Amino acid sequence: MPACLIALLALVLLGAAAGCGRPGSPPVKGPQPEDLPVYKVATGFSLPGSPTWERAKRRGHLVVGVKEDQPYMGEKDPASGRYSGFDIEIAKMMSASLGFDPKTIEFKTIASANRETALQNGQIDYYVGTYTINDNRKKQVGFAGPYFMAGQSLLVRKDEKDIKGPEDLAGKKVCSAAGSTPYQRLQKEYPEAVLVAYDTYSACVDNLLTYQVDAVSTDDSILLGYAAKVPDELKVVGKPFSEEPYGIGVPRSDNALRLALDDALEANEKNGNWKKAYEATLGLSGQPAPPPPAIDRYPAG
Ligand code: GLU
């Protein structure tokens, strides 16, 4: 494997951003703190109908489940331990609306396959991490939102010529995360693809760069981030082939929290925070801010 590729691999995994082997190439821009909105912490807010909020109040801060290896969405800087990305901004604006200073949030990295259990056993108060709302998951958790619409797509190496869309995957090794909707869709709708599952998409990208797999499949929002970090090595191909509405996961029975988060999302979409947060994070991977999807305040049950 060329040395540059090994270096790239390390960069992708560590979430570091730099040009590789191209003297003078500018470092890839990450979210800049000065471009991010400042969220006004609600004063005198209380949500007595929510056991989750009450528990957080007693604790003094919120515990929020996120991803740590998804550039521009949810990424942890290994040096400072700080999290950044669009999902992280959503988590912060929600915290401020619930009356908790976003600076006090305790972030916990939770992989795709463990989200429902983490919400069910009280490990986290809510979850913001490229989490698709669907009926199956709604049997186990509640969802505020949606706050963003993504779609399943494909990431391949720049030199890949055969794979242009999901119909080209027969006999190809395709990597996705265990417990994710993209993995389930491949299994059901593209049974001739040879599926490989890891806990994280960064492990899949690692395998793609080292020629262990031929493609990585998940939401375009996630794949565009990896491609933007190493544009000389990776590209996103084809059109999105699913709809992935992102929601904020909450404990299933906590309808008061779910509806309060719906209100908070709507308020932040109206006051411009949502768009500003998008532009300073996910927007860096090259897509202009779309209009946010309509919030779905579904009945409790
Ligand atoms: N949005 C998809 C899901 O919730 C894929 C991304 C992820 O695994 O977080 O399964």
Image: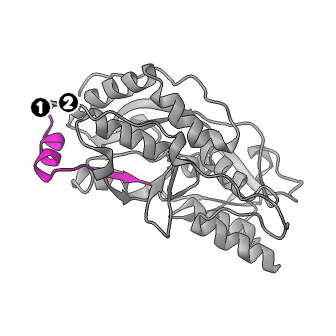
CA gap, disc 1 to disc 2? 6 Å
Q: Which residues are magenta?
A: 50-66
Among the 4 quarters of the image, the one containing residue 92: top left
Among the 4 quarters of the image, the one containing residue 50: top left
Which residue is denoted by mark 1 in the rendering? 49
Horizontal and vertical percent for residue 281? 57, 43
Secondary element at image label 2: helix
Residue 171 position (above or below residue 152): below
- Contact (CB < 8 A) between labels 1 and 2? yes
Horizontal and vertical percent for residue 264? 33, 28
Type of amino acid at the residue the image marks with label 1: Gly
**What residue appears at the point 40 percent right and 34 percent down from the top-left corner?**
135
Cβ of disc 2 within 8 Å of ligand 1? no
Which residue is denoted by mark 2 in the rendering? 256
**What residue appears at the point 54 percent right and 58 percent down from the top-left corner?**
177
Q: Which quadrant would the C terminus be assigned to in this image?
A: top left
